[in-house]
Amino acid sequence: MSPSLIFYIIFAVPYIIFMYWLVKQDKRKYAWGLAIITIVAILAIYVSQKASKVAMDNYQQHQIDSREIEREERLQKQQDSINHAQQ
């Protein structure tokens, strides 16, 4: 709950206040407000797509690393069994 509260306090509330002020200042039927909202929405979609791609890449790399660690552990156990059997 706290991350969402922090998000609202730091980003959402100031943004809403700024947009309200901007729309009130605009004498041309809210053209600036609509333009800024459109730009912010496009940027948000772009950032979301970029973040999703990075998250998927990290997840895939984590899977590869986990498989490699499991393989190394299996090889180490086999080596330990061989060494133990020879003694």
Image (cartoon, grey):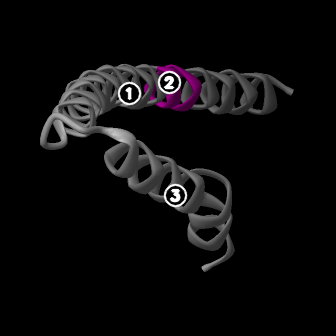
Query: Residue drawn 16% across and 34% down?
Result: 28
Look at the picture and state if 27 lies above or below 43: below
The residues tagged by marks 3 and 2 sit, at their Cα atoms, a distance apart of 55 Å
Residue 46 image offset from top left, x and y in percent: 25, 21
Query: Residue drawn 51% across and 22% down?
Result: 65
| Residue 51: image tag | 1
Residue 69 figure quarter: top right
Boundaries of the magenta span: 65-71
Farthest bottom residue?
1
| Residues at discs 3 and 2 in contact (Cβ within 8 Å) | no
Of the image marks 1 and 2, the number of the one nearer the N terminus: 1
Residue 42 image offset from top left, x and y in percent: 20, 25
Residue 74 image offset from top left, x and y in percent: 55, 31
Identify the residue under disc 3.
Answer: 17
Of the image marks 3 and 2, the number of the one nearer the N terminus: 3
At label 2, which amino acid type do we have? Arg
